Amino acid sequence: MIVMKFGGTSVETADRIRRSAALVADYADDHRIVVVVSALAKITDQILACANAAAGGDARTLHSLLGNIEERHHAVISGLFPGNSGLIVREHIHPALQQLRDFCDALLQLRSLTPQLLDVALPLGEKMSAQIFAAALSQLGLRGSYVDASEILITDDRFGDASVDMEETRSRTRQKLGPLLDSGHVPVVTGYCGSTRKRQPTTLGRGGSDTSGTILGAALQADEVWIWTDVDGILTADPRICHDARVLPEITFREAIELSYYGAKVIHRKAVSYAMDMHIPVRIKNSFKPDFPGTKITAASAGSDGRVRAVTATSNSTLVSLCIKNEFHLAAEILGRLFLRLGHDCVDVLFAMQSSAENSVGLVLRGEDTDRVLGSIDRLFHSELKQGVIESLEVERELTTVAVMGENLKRTPELLGRLFTAVSRCGVSVVAAAQGANELSVCFAVSSKSVADVVRSIHSEFFPIHFSDGSDERSTAWNELSAEV
């Protein structure tokens, strides 16, 4: 069995849905297939804009957005289904369109928007795209069957970023999808969404449709999960920075999670974790180049051990530094309270450093969390700051976190020397640095102004281009590649 998830760009237009449906048909003879779909590209953003306009009382903008959403789906249907068959598919998506209009009309009166309310509207894009995709499969002679994930994917009530009750989801998924698969149907499941045990709609947060795919793969014990997207796979670097970045044929689950944490956007770490728990391989494939093998994510990967696999850059990072009065019991107590607060607030710390001699700690954070963290520090340690127990609080913004990663990097003694030699070639100062205890990454922060040069230099160091005479080019490379990782 293969679970195939199609992203928004793979279902953006009639032609792309037709192409994606044909990919399912190509494999349906030899495999049982479950399809998971995102909303049409940018539709979720437009639904969010509708909700914000309605809550803000902007009826004119709201009605324009609603009209665009309806017109776009009708245009896709017209491009796929001629005559009466198109009218039938329009009828299938009409309830979702009407629900969106009713929801926004209610918000115009309520003038309030909460994460719980938003989770009612945001999945409507997936509900429409799944209906269209199921009909496209049926047009090809397959038995496409629409499935609303809220019937099978059960979550907690953390609206906007819900976590899945895997045991209940596994039971419901097998009860619902098992008979469909056994009778030769191809279930087409809405991505990104679920519901609580009380039937309250929920969404899974960033990368939610990928997460839906791996959850269903784990629940059904699929052979593989395929994430169809618009890129060739997971690359050694951001190709917008490194024009010689290349596709990694294989990486481990742990490497994929680390890459996602430090900025790679091909697949979200939460999606990988569900596949890792059940040892379900995940493939990242390009729906526009289906014959390209892409990247396979597995428990173990040949060539990973001790080698740098990729370099990433997380822009908009901030260094927050606290220096605490030189009394050990004070430092331990303050740092304990600080990290407890960060955990409670669900703040991602990209990396941290502590100097016991000076009782100081440095936290590198995502920029969007900075003001929230500073507010928490001010409230939590107001008296300590006033009394001088915390001697200084410094903030350095406009940084970028650069990370190199791979399995068991500590086994590569020369790694740090090569890494910081590559950085020094750029004449750039490292503001903060740390090596992960999990042996998967080395991270450091530099000025955002210099990050492109730094990433290129590191990539050139660890991924040199090989020429036919055996020589290496360890500089910024724009040439076409002739070697695999």
Image (tube, grey):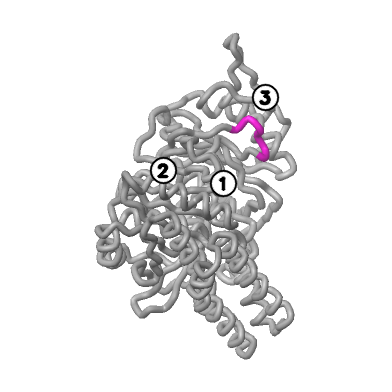
**The label number, if any, that marks residue 230 in the structure image:** 1
Left or right of residue 338, residue 35 in this image: left
Q: Are marks 1 and 3 in contact (CB under 8 Å)?
A: no
Q: Does 345 sit left or right of 476 as displayed? A: left
Q: Is residue 186 magenta?
A: no
| Magenta stretch: dominant secondary structure | loop
Quote the CA–CA distance across marks 2 and 1.
23 Å
Q: Nearer the viewer, mark 1 or mark 3?
A: 1
Say which label, 1 or 3, has the lower sequence index: 1
Specify start and end residues of the magenta stretch as a single range. 240-245
Examine the structure image and report whether residue 241 is included in the region drawn in magenta. Answer: yes
The location of residue 325, given as percent across then percent down, is: 58, 56
Identify residue for label 2.
254
Work out how far the residue at label 2 is from the one at label 3, CA to CA, in angstroms.
31 Å
Q: Is residue 403 left or right of residue 251?
A: right
Label 2 is placed on what type of residue? Arg
Helix, strand or loop at mark 2: helix
Q: Residue 479 got which mark?
A: 3
| Element type where label 1 sits in the image | loop
Local packing at callout 3 (Cα closer than 10 Å; few below 14, some 14-19, many 20+) is few
Residue 468: x, y in percent? 59, 12
Q: Is residue 86 left or right of residue 29?
A: right
Label 2 or label 1, whichever lies nearer to me, is 1
Residue beneath the point at 63% across and 38% down: 239
Instruction: Using the numbered discs, state the Cα–Cα distance from disc 1 to disc 3 in whole angstroms.
Output: 23 Å
| Residue occupying the point 61% across, 43% down | 313
Q: State the residue in front, 33 or 150.
A: 33
User: Residue reaching furthest top?
Assistant: 469
The mark nearer the N terminus, 2 or 1, is: 1
The type of residue carrying mark 3 is Asn
